[in-house]
Image (tube, rainbow, N blue to C red):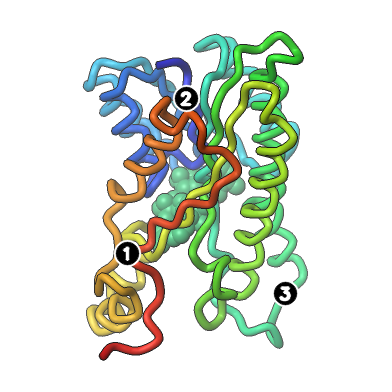
Amino acid sequence: MGVLLITGGSRGIGAAVARRAAKLGHAVAVNYRADGDAAAAVVASVKQAGAEAAAFCADVAVEAEVQQLFQAVDREFGPLAALVNSAGINGGKASVADFDGEELSHLMAVNVVGTMLCCREAVRRMSTRSGGSGGVIVNVSSMAATIGGRPGSSHYAASKAAVDAFTVGLAREVGEQGIRVNAIRPGMTDTDMTDELRQDPALHRAIAGTIAMNRIAEVEEIAQPILWLLSDQASFVSGSCLDASGGGFMIGRP
Ligand SMILES: NC(=O)c1ccc[n+]([C@@H]2O[C@H](COP(=O)([O-])OP(=O)(O)OC[C@H]3O[C@@H](n4cnc5c(N)ncnc54)[C@H](OP(=O)(O)O)[C@@H]3O)[C@@H](O)[C@H]2O)c1
């Protein structure tokens, strides 16, 4: 199945993709920024499933670290076949009147520029024009991009809308170079990023009530469509933004 690099593979959605990818026989490169223990646990569980795996520390917002990450994956595993850009932050809740410029720049650096830099490195390796064998990329966006985000998340929504637009543009640019590029737009999903819902059952119920299926997603429910997008079953799917959203946002319940 080839070498798969997952940015933000140490926790949440990225970790679920790593665990499932192992069962499909991918060699899995697990990128993380800070939580080495979590990355090591994911690597251990991938290996237990019989696949190759290693953890790679790199901040996707730092260009030199992104370059080193891809070089390290080249050395450890050989040619990259697939990339999932799951590394992301929510930037905290803030109304526009309270925005802090540095925090905004950091959010965009991680969610947008980080995704773009990782795609650049992947394209350089995968493109049939530069001697590669082609490949597939999935960028993890968000349903927030479709509605401007929930209250206090317009900056996060904007970062994910940028991911969507970039995904469509990149797919067109590299379609003839053997590379498919898609985005997935998860709805609210149970991860550390949404820890406040674990802490507050009333908030959890209220958020669930805004989703057509009246619940939030488990990470496996996002990982599976990502793996489908990576697979040959999606061989003619490129430039798409796939909603994994439980039916999307409810305006009101009948
Ligand atoms: N959870 C949701 O409801 C939801 C909904 C829609 C979209 N998403 C998107 O899904 C993706 C994964 O989110 P999640 O919920 O799985 O989040 P999570 O549980 O908080 O995990 C985030 C992952 O990203 C890594 N990361 C963060 N900043 C990084 C950086 N600068 N460089 C490299 N890695 C970095 C973290 O590494 P460390 O462990 O080292 O910190 C961790 O592995 C994100 O892009 C998020 O925006 C999430």
**Where is mark 1, residue-wise?**
246
Query: Of circles 3 and 1, which is in front?
Result: 1
Where, by quadrant of the figure, is residue 195 drawn?
bottom left
Residue 37 shows in the view: no
Looking at numbered disc 2 in the image, what kind of residue is underneath it?
Leu
Circle 1 crowding by C-alpha within 10 Å: few under 14, some 14–19, many from 20: some
Q: Which mark is residue 188?
A: none
Label located before the other in sequence (3 or 1): 3
Q: Nearer the viewer, mark 3 or mark 2?
A: 2
- Labels 3 and 2: the sequence-earlier one: 2
- Residue 160 x, y percent position in the rendering: 60, 59
Q: Residue at x 57, y 12 (%)?
A: 79
The quarter of the picture where residue 61 lies is top right
Residue beneath label 3, please? 100
The residue that disc 2 covers is 4
Q: Is residue 134 above or below residue 208?
A: above
Is residue 122 among the parts visible in the rendering?
A: yes
Whether residue 8 sits left or right of residue 253 in the image: it is: right
